[in-house]
Image (cartoon, grey):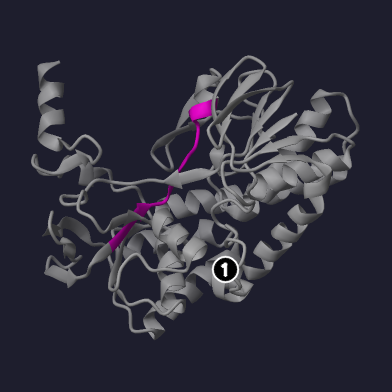
């Protein structure tokens, strides 16, 4: 039994399988466990949990301590990239060495990555994803710039901005594309998890208390700068139509997350279009089974619901595997986990409504805006190809 990912879902999945007498192989591309949200700091770094994880400190500590108890009892393979698979075989690479891992069942707990929307000028040095800026802070205790702007939408925008404020960084502004009215209309769904809603309000309050300007309903126009100097500012249009320029030397950008589905796609698993978030996601049943026998998924790689839901989904998918192996499962515990995920899913839909994906922003991109930062392909070039076809 192979689990990919040592974040919240992977850890709880391994814990549940081990309790049932199954010793799984746990593969993770990071050097240490915890995933992205509970990423551990490197060995030798001594920042306390409160400084590193804020309101999620207790949850991070609990997950880390759980993994520390698991580690001697499972086949844990950190710093290992799972890059391809065939039926029953997983291709991995670690420190330049290629290996093939055979499996009877594979549980994908690979999490999610940043979801980005291009903006004119985003190819300039100093433009980061929200996840990248968070990694810099958690892993190396450094800010991505001396004066940072956070732009995009979604809970991660406020979480990372508040973490930067807490670390003493100069946060010039938080620029959110979602209007306030969307949050009001989504409130009935967001109240499915009042504790998380309160934490979100608390993060916003911390930013206001620190004197950080927070603007809602903005329309991003351009990241200002040059190839020589990198980012020097950002220009947006405020909700009232007023133009706003903010000076900065770094920008963290992101709009929620997108699930890591590459391995599932290679395995031939079916995808479905999620109307709430406006993106393609892995098609799984209530317990994490995909359309391919022996291939399971849990956590944000299956459905983006956050770290708490990932832990529960990790437990549930392990129970599904045990059921498929005709092994005993605690039915009352299984029902309890399912029930908790119903509320979490309602909250997920509420978040998608409160912080919508700005699809219109793509149509409004000027022709000279770079879309692909690797190959420097512009929006105009892409539109030209589409017209030719």
Extreme residue toward the front, this view: 96
Q: Quadrant of residue 49?
A: bottom right
Q: Which residue is mark 1?
A: 53
Is residue 193 found left or right of 73 in the rendered image?
A: left
For residue 160, side relative to residue 82 (left or right): left
Main secondary structure found in the magenta portion = strand
> Disc 1 on helix, strand or loop?
helix
Q: Is residue 205 visible?
A: no
Q: Give coordinates of residue 177: x percent, y percent.
A: 28, 58
Verify whether residue 258 appears in magenta: yes
Residue at image position (60%, 30%) is 284
Specify the segment rendered in magenta: 251-263
User: Does the magenta-highlighted stretch encompass residue 384?
Assistant: no
Rendered view: 279 above or below 118? above
Q: Residues within 10 Å of mark 1 (few under 14, many from 20)?
A: many
Residue 190, given in percent of the width and then of the height, sits at: 52, 59
Rendered view: 147 above or below 86: below
Q: Is residue 332 visible?
A: yes
Q: Position of residue 318 (x, y in %)?
A: 76, 36
Position of the C terminus by quadrant: top left
Q: Is residue 236 above or below residue 30?
A: below
Q: Seen in the image, is 154 located left or right of residue 37?
A: left
Q: Nearer the viewer, residue 103 or 78?
A: 78
Quadrant housing the N terminus? top right
* 319 sits to left or right of 9: right
């Amino acid at each position: 039994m192979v689990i990919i990912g040592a974040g919240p879902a992977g850890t709880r999945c391994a814990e549940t399988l081990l309790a049932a007498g199954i010793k799984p192989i746990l593969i993770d591309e990071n050097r240490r466990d915890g995933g992205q949200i509970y990423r551990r700091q490197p060995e030798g770094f001594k920042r306390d949990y409160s400084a590193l994880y804020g309101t999620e400190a207790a949850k991070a500590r609990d997950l880390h301590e759980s993994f520390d108890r698991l580690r001697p009892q499972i086949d844990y393979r950190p710093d290992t990239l799972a890059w391809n698979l065939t039926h029953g075989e997983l291709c991995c690479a670690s420190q330049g060495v290629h290996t093939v891992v055979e499996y009877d069942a594979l549980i994908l707990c690979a999490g999610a990555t940043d979801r980005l929307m291009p903006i004119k000028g985003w190819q300039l040095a100093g433009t980061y994803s929200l996840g990248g800026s968070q990694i810099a802070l958690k892993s190396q205790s450094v800010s991505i710039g001396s004066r940072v702007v956070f732009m995009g939408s979604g809970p991660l925008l406020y979480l990372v901005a508040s973490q930067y404020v807490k670390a003493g960084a100069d946060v010039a502004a938080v620029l959110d594309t979602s209007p306030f009215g969307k949050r009001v209309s989504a409130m009935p769904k967001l109240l499915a998890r009042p504790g998380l809603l309160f934490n979100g309000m608390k993060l916003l309050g911390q930013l206001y208390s620190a004197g950080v300007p927070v603007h809602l309903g903005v329309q991003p126009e351009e990241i200002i700068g040059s190839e020589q100097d990198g980012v020097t500012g950002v220009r947006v249009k405020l909700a009232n139509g007023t133009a706003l320029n903010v000076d900065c030397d770094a920008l963290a950008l992101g709009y929620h997350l997108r699930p890591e589905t590459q391995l599932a796609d290679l395995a031939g698993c079916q995808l479905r279009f999620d109307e709430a978030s406006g993106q393609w996601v892995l098609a799984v049943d209530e317990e994490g089974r995909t359309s391919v026998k022996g291939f399971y998924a849990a956590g944000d790689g299956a459905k983006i619901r956050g770290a708490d839901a990932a832990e529960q989904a990790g437990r549930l998918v392990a129970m599904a595997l045990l059921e498929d192996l005709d092994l005993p499962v605690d039915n009352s515990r299984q029902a309890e986990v399912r029930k908790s995920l119903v509320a979490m899913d309602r909250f997920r839909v509420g978040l998608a409504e409160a912080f919508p994906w700005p699809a219109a922003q793509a149509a409004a991109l000027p022709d000279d805006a770079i879309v692909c930062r690797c190959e420097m392909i512009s929006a105009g070039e892409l539109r030209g190809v589409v017209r030719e076809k």
